[in-house]
Structures are given as C-alpha cells and as structure tokens.
Image: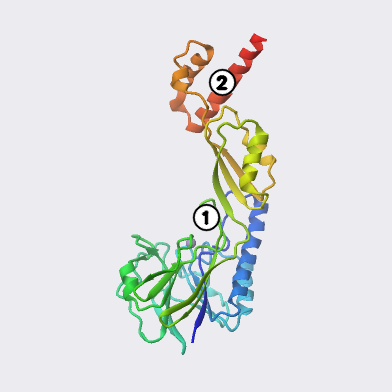
Amino acid sequence: MSLKIIHCADVHFDSAMSGLDAKKVNIRRDEMKRTFARIIDLSQNADMLIIAGDLFDGKHVSKSTLDFLKGEFSKIPDTKVYIIGGNHDFLGADSVYRAFEFGSNVHVFGTETECVETPEYDIWGASFKSANDEREMLSSFMVKNADKINIGIFHANIGGNDYNPLKVADIEKSGLDYLALGHIHKATEIKQVGTTHYAYCGCPEGRGYDETGEKGVYAIELTKGNILRADFVPVCERMYFDEEIDVTDIFGYDEIVDKINEKYKGEKHIYRFTLTGKNNMAIDTDVLCERIDAFSLVVRDNTKPAVDIEKLSEEFSLKGLFARYALADKGNMSEEEFNEALKVGLNYIEKEENNENR
Ligand SMILES: [Mn+2]
C-alpha cells in the first residue's frame, strides 16, 4: 500500500502584502485563492493534504476567506486535510480554528502533540499555542506503532533557538517516515536522517522580495520505509524577482531599459531591480519604471559615480572644489543621497563648462 501526500505550508491568507497598492493587493489576494485552488486540484487523488502551519497570516481572518476554504475542502471529500496552527495562526483561545467548522474531512491538531490513527497510517502533529512557541515538540517523541506508516506535521525551526526548535537528532529518533515541515518559506530538498524523510515545502506564493522565484508544494508518494516519488510542484501565480543590474559603461535610458528587459523578458511578475556599478548618469528611476510594463516594478539606483572623488577633491578646479564640499558634507547623507548629489553636481558643472567653451 502506498500513501499519496500533498504537503503545503505558509499560505498566509489575508496578509497585508507590503509594497503593493490597494488595487494590486486585491488582485494578489484573488491570485492566492487561485493558487490554493490548484493545491486542492492536486489533492484530488491524494490520501491527504497537509497544511503545516501559517495558513492564515494572523488571527483576524475574513469571512470570505473562511467560506472560500470551506468550499475548497468540500471539493475533496475523499482526501483528508490535516492542519496545524503555526506562529502566525497559533491556536489561541479566540483562534478561528476553534470557532469555524471547516468540514468533516478536515482535522486541526490541538496544542499538545496528538496522533490520528487510521488503518493505513498514523499521523502526528501539534499546533503552536502562542506566537513564539518555544517548546521542542519532537524532543523525546517516539511513534506508537512503528510498523505502520507514520507521518508528522510540525511548524518548526530546525537548528534554531525559537519557534519549536527541532534537533536533527530528534528527527532521527522519531520513528516518523515523513515529516512535513512549515515555517521556512523556501523549499528544501527532501532530506533523510535515519529512516525519516523530511522537508520544508516553502510558501506556495511569494509575498515579498525576500520570497523570490518559483513557489509550490511537495507531492509525495511513499510506502513504509520508502519514498516512491517526491516532486516539487510549482503552483504560484506570480513570482517575485530581486536582482541587481550592472549599468557600468552604459549610457542613456534606452540602454538601461534594454538591459532590464534582458532579465524581465516581458513577463508580468513582481520585480525589484537594483542598478549597480559605476555610472555618471543621474538616473530618474520613475522614468525607467514608466517604460516597463510589469505587474509591479521597483527600480533602485545604487550606482556610484564613475569618478575617484578623493582624487578629484585634490584638483584645483570647480569640480575639485565641489568634491571637497561634498566630502565634507558626506556624514549628513545616506550613501545613496551622496552618490546622487555627486552625479547631479558634477553633471551640472560639466554642462556649464561645455557652455563656456562653446
Ligand atoms: Mn510562515
């Protein structure tokens, strides 16, 4: 007998989605629902859907989100849904997990480690009882029926000091066959210690520039002691990109736009490009953003002027004088402001000198 599992975590429904305007936040929230609907689709033929914490971003969950979830879970009546509360949606006294009825195929684990026994497998899990639950939930843990398939679901920080810190040695002693983890938003590969396989699947949809690239879930098929299949299945609607673009030796907005387009490729994702390198152009990043049709785009200018400012400050010239004043005032500015001021000033002086020489 083999067991099919869809392992997801950290959906963070109803989160604020920083950096996007209100209209785009609403679009992203709809996309989040489509992403979740895809996870439900994947779960049609699975024995279980595991949600390893932080299904919600906080304790305030909208009625529409709850009704949506109930509707989705009802589409997979033959798939068991196992949920634990993570640090964001811990099982406090006023938790939605206590108040809302998600459906007869849905089980939410309580705050003490419990086991749901079925003829085919035992599944173990526990919800966080506070935002920073420091209990080590797997220390001195041991499965009950070692000859059965044993699954674990925990929100945890492997090797950390907080958020249910897990020791790899405890995983090794657990007797679990598969440990489905949540909390870290970046997927790991399927790891193995002793006879236990374990993984973080990451979040299914990025919500910030620290959650870049393809996001998804794990589709696992296993028998006692054997992983038959472990596929990372991307399900995200949109991706975040946070990349640097070196604009040394390129000049003019056209060339910078070309260079951005090489990375951007016309796709409607969420981008943050940071211009780096040395360039004397005083770049208006708004102009760049207007010329690129992305879902969301931020361009930051971290370029430095292509001059040696220390050396310039020793010159007996208007530029030299400007450089001396600029260096003297440097302490009052951020690095970015300083570089911007240098470029604007030096470009201005250059223009004036060119006019005089005409
Ligand atoms: Mn999370």
Location of residue 154 with respect to 247 vertically, above or below? below
Judge from the rendering whether residue 14 lies leftward or rightward of residue 23; answer left or right: left
Q: Which residue is mark 2?
A: 346
Residue 171 position within the rendered picture, expressed as x and y whole percent measured from the top left: 35, 72
Ligand 1 within 8 angstroms of badge 1 C-beta: no
Locate the C terminus and report the quarter of the image it occupies: top right
Q: Which residue is mark 1?
A: 211
At 56% from the left and 21% from the top, the residue drawn is 345
Which quadrant of the structure image shows residue 29?
A: bottom right
Q: Residues within 10 Å of mark 2 (few under 14, many from 20)?
A: many
Residue 156 position within the rendered picture, expressed as x and y whole percent measured from the top left: 40, 66
Which residue occupies the foreground of this view, 234 or 107?
Answer: 234
Q: Residue furthest bottom?
A: 119
Q: CA distance from mark 1 to mark 2?
A: 38 Å
Label 1 secondary element: loop
Dot 1 and dot 2 residues touching (CB under 8 Å): no
Q: Earlier in the sequence, mark 1 or mark 2?
A: 1
Which residue occupies the foreground of this view, 161 or 242?
Answer: 242
Label 2 secondary element: helix
At 43% from the left and 79% from the top, the residue drawn is 226
At 61% from the left and 51% from the top, the residue drawn is 270
Q: Which amino acid lies under the numbered mark 2 shown in the image of this protein?
A: Leu
Residue 35 is marked as none
Judge from the rendering whether residue 131 lies leftward or rightward of residue 257; answer left or right: left
Q: Residues within 10 Å of mark 1 (few under 14, many from 20)?
A: some
Location of residue 272 with respect to 89 vertically, above or below? above
Location of residue 59 with respect to 116 vertically, above or below? above
Residue 82 position within the rendered picture, expressed as x and y whole percent measured from the top left: 50, 77
